[in-house]
Amino acid sequence: MTTKEKLVIFDTTLRDGEQSPGASMTKDEKLRIAKVLEKMNVDVIEAGFAVSSQGDFDAVKLIANTVRDSRICSLSRAMTGDIERAGEALRGANAGRIHTFIATSPIHMKYKLQMEPDEVLAQAVGAVKTARDLMDDVEFSLEDASRTDFDFMCRVTEAVIAAGARTINFPDTVGYSAPGEYGSMIQRLLNRVPNADQAVFSVHCHNDLGLAVANSLSAVQNGARQVECTINGLGERAGNASLEELVMAIRTRQDLYPVETAIDPSHIVPISRLVSSITGFPVQPNKAIVGANAFAHESGIHQDGILKMRETYEIMKAEDVGWSTNKLSLGKLSGRAALAARLEDLGISFDSKEDFNQTFRRFKDLADKKREIFDEDLQALVSDVQMGTEDEALTLVNLEVLSKSGQLPHAKLTIRYQDQNHDAEASGDGAVDAIFNAIEKLIKSDTELQLYSVNAVTQGTDSQGDVTVRLEKDGRIINGQGADTDILVASANAYLHALTLMRNPGRLHPQLGGV
Ligand code: KIV
Ligand code: ZN
């Protein structure tokens, strides 16, 4: 029997994932995701970029103070102010990590940083030393490593390890690498850097050419022992390597990979849905592991094979990754204990009794409108309840829509904010347009509607509609979500959710120059 080495799973859904245009999350939403990541045994959770905004700082701090079993990390540029802010946000963590970085490729150094290589090297070493004064666990990333001169990459790596960094990350920042090349880069680095044995070598791959997972796996075969990844492959531009694909590739091909992870895969589908419902980024049906069709068999030959012997066409078990076979979960007669138990199975917990009580009331309302309630319904319902618990949330109190053929639809609504109810009414080119016009009469947000989409949460005409609204203002893009059996209510909620998120100030982007 061969002994496997541990592969560290570093999840950056809450940091790089949140850099996807529109994927902004509130601190409570981030905490909900972090709690499931902890439950599934993710080793390191990158909770945000503390210096980028007060909201990010608060989210990192909240997660650091709450999550006990995973290490909590904050990103920081190689600047003293950033590093100190990260250290402050992480003060309450059971196990914390400061992740500092600077770009090392010729193109980034010359045009973005406008610095000479020796200056970059000195700044990297200084940043690691500053971070080590605050925390034992320091990670250093050479941004755009895959386009960095190899000799310079070796010099920087050796120097930051000597300065005290314990994880060195070599990002394929622009998704440029190919698997063979990237794996061999890691192997050559491990062979060349004299103090390589004092650090874990990590990879962070972007998916611009659809190769993020392949590149990461090639690096693992060549000695990388940490992979940075996100749920559903969320992330800047085309996204990052997807956690579920990496974990299941390693688990399924134990004959091939010399490593194992601590991840409990049964949380994969629930967390994929949670992230999708919070961010408003739907999962494509044919997405590996978590897409609706990932375990569906259409052709008669395949179905026949599966019935005779499952392994003829299935290399993984749907139940292992948390597919609940879409079975009936709860109904009208289910009580509080049954709801609490099912939510717990889905990885959903509540900070207060009032949050649970509110969820229970919404569950009963939903059960009056919808005969069968599935896990997907519960997830949508909890997302909706928790959206309304943010301090500054705009909430829908009442909605009436009059839609008669030959007449312009008219909406009358009441929304609550700053502890008061406010009424408005307006007409529009359609019922949804009338609702949005009425909301705008009150809020005057000056935003532009970029996208409006409705998806059914489950099958059937009584399914909840899951609405995504994307708003843009001054270059900032925000997605809002709403779910209800009445799609007009879901639309109003999604619009209000986006406006609530828009009220949070914008964040500094980590990869801006400014070092
Ligand atoms: O893609 C990248 O290079 C990053 C670094 C900041 C780690 O996200
Ligand atoms: Zn990245």
Image (cartoon, helix red, strand yellow):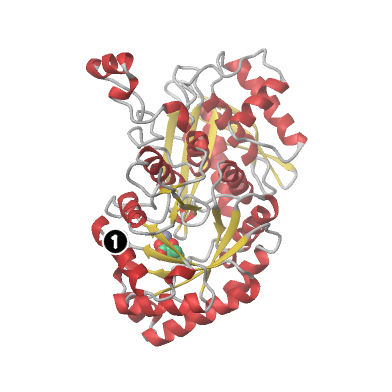
Judged from this view, the residue extending furthest toward the front is 1
Residue 345 in the image: x percent, y percent? Answer: 60, 29
Q: Quadrant of residue 1?
A: top left
Q: Is residue 362 left or right of residue 438?
A: right
Judged from this view, the residue extending furthest toward the left is 301
Residue 61 in the image: x percent, y percent? Answer: 66, 58
Q: Which residue is mark 1?
A: 182
Q: Is residue 161 visible?
A: yes
Circle 1: element type? helix
Q: Residue at x 53, y 53 (%)?
A: 14
Residue 179 in the image: x percent, y percent? Answer: 26, 56
Q: Residue at x 41, y 27 (%)?
A: 317
Q: Is residue 265 left or right of residue 423?
A: left
State yes or no: Cβ of the residue under disc 1 lies below 8 Å from any atom of ligand 1. Answer: no
The image shows residue 312, relative to residue 473, as above or below, that is above
Quadrant for ligand 1 reads: bottom left
In depth, the one of 51 and 136 nearer the eye is 136
Q: Is residue 504 visible?
A: no
Count of all numbered marks drawn on residues in the image: 1
The image shows residue 493, relative to residue 172, as above or below, that is above
In depth, the one of 471 and 172 nearer the eye is 172
Residue 491 in the image: x percent, y percent? Answer: 51, 34
In depth, the one of 429 and 68 nearer the eye is 68
Mark 1, Cα crowd under 10 Å, few <14 / some 14-19 / many 20+, is many
Inspect the image, locate mark 1, and give the three-letter code of the amino acid beneath it: Tyr
In depth, the one of 184 and 484 nearer the eye is 184
